[in-house]
Amino acid sequence: MQTEIPFLFMRGGSSRGLYFRAEDVPADRAMLGRVLRAALGSGHPLNIDGLGGGASVTTKVAILSRNESGIDFFFAQVDPLRDVVDYKPSCFNILSGVGPAAFEMGLLAAMGEETRVSIHAVNTGARIDALVKTPQGRVTYDGVQAIDGVPGTAAPVALKFRGIAGSSCGAMLPTGYAQEVIDGLDVTLLDVAMPIMILRAADLGLTGGESRAEIDTNTALLARLEGMRLEAGRRMMAGADVSASVTPKVALISAPVAGGTLRARYLTPWACHPSMAVSGAQCLSACAVLPGSVAQGLAQPPATGPAELRIEHPMGVLPVLLDFTCGPQGAAIHSAGILRTARLLARGMVMVPRGVWGGAG
């Protein structure tokens, strides 16, 4: 016998994962972690005994519940190999599937040709409005919106993020500095949608145009960045040990080469993202407009917002509509908007061994 758990299997943006109703999974975090690792097959390079895909962008989980004004979205990042489930960050690619999933699960009713869904990202406290295409009162996944890193086209999901500055660390600049030094290199420690340690690729002897494989096989580079990331975590998160956490992330930036605002390679944090995280693009956009940051001299940002900033990544460009103002005290980030797509891939029951969890009953 195995424990059956109802789920949706969805692509959200350029990530993929399992979507559950909160009532169907354990509330206890330790037990929830064991259940999610079993469901995804964590611990094997191919996640062969579960539904994961062997990479951090395919071992993500969304847990949804209804609140007074919309949907609570709780995110879990399951490590493909290690016995680690991180509940600290959120994922705004997976977020793009939350509105459609809420309709599919019966948590919300569609209204009109488009339905606005108010989403609370429980992990970080961020508030997001999602505009989902719902012709004839049903979610549609068909459309002409293309996003880099995903083949084909689909219906757009428009996302507007509010309250993202300092959402994890309590301040946009947790240390109070636009630029500081770690291990002899200039860095910007920034918390806008996601805490990130940002540094110039050239300071590491890189061009900034390296492929995902070139970064992932550069063991000396990854080891140095991890040591720097641990120190960044201590500075950003009140002395916390972040060795088992996926935050802060790491981004290597360089001057744009394809008409964008900034070129970046985003680490998740122990491997290079195949494209770009939505939260990462928002934070890097904020870095581009922040006076005195490591992006100064690389980016050519607009003087004031709202304006579109374009982050170049290994698979293309991710545009962000950033509403911001700059003044003598630095930059203030008011909101960020982005277009994503999502698609329901499968629905049913995921099986978890009874020895892991016997079920809600």
Image (cartoon, grey):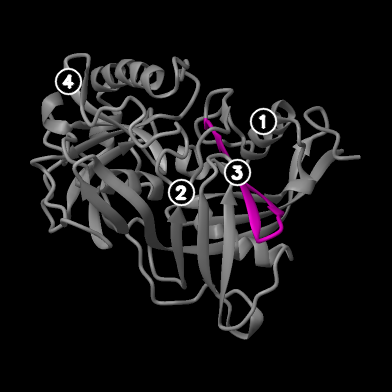
Residue 158: x %, y % from top left: 44, 67
Q: Mark 2 or 3, which is nearer the eye?
A: 2
Residue at left 45%, top 54%?
162
Q: Distance between the residues labelled 2 and 3?
A: 13 Å
Q: Which amino acid does label 3 sit on?
A: Val
Mark 3 or 1, nearer chain start:
1
Query: Label 1 neighbourhood size at 10 Å, few (<14), some (14-19), many (20+)?
Result: many
The answer to whether residue 275 is visible is: no
Tell me the tag on residue 33: 1
Mark 1 or 4, nearer chain start:
1
Question: Which residue in the protein does label 2 denote?
Answer: 163
Q: Does the magenta stretch include residue 124?
A: no
The quadrant of the picture occupied by the C terminus is top right
Q: How far apart are marks 4 and 3 (CA)?
A: 34 Å
Tell me the tag on residue 122: 3
Mark 4 or 3, nearer chain start:
3
Kindly indicate whether the residue at mark 3 contacts the one at mark 2 (C-beta within 8 angstroms).
no
Look at the image and give the residue range highlighted in magenta: 62-80
Residue at left 15%, top 25%?
204
Question: Which residue in the protein does label 4 denote?
Answer: 185
- Asked whether 114 or 252 is in front, the reply is 114
Element at badge 3? loop
The quadrant of the picture occupied by the N terminus is top right
Q: Does the magenta stretch include residue 70?
A: yes
Q: Distance between the residues labelled 3 and 1?
A: 17 Å
Tell me the tag on residue 18: none
Q: How far apart are marks 1 and 4 (CA)?
A: 36 Å
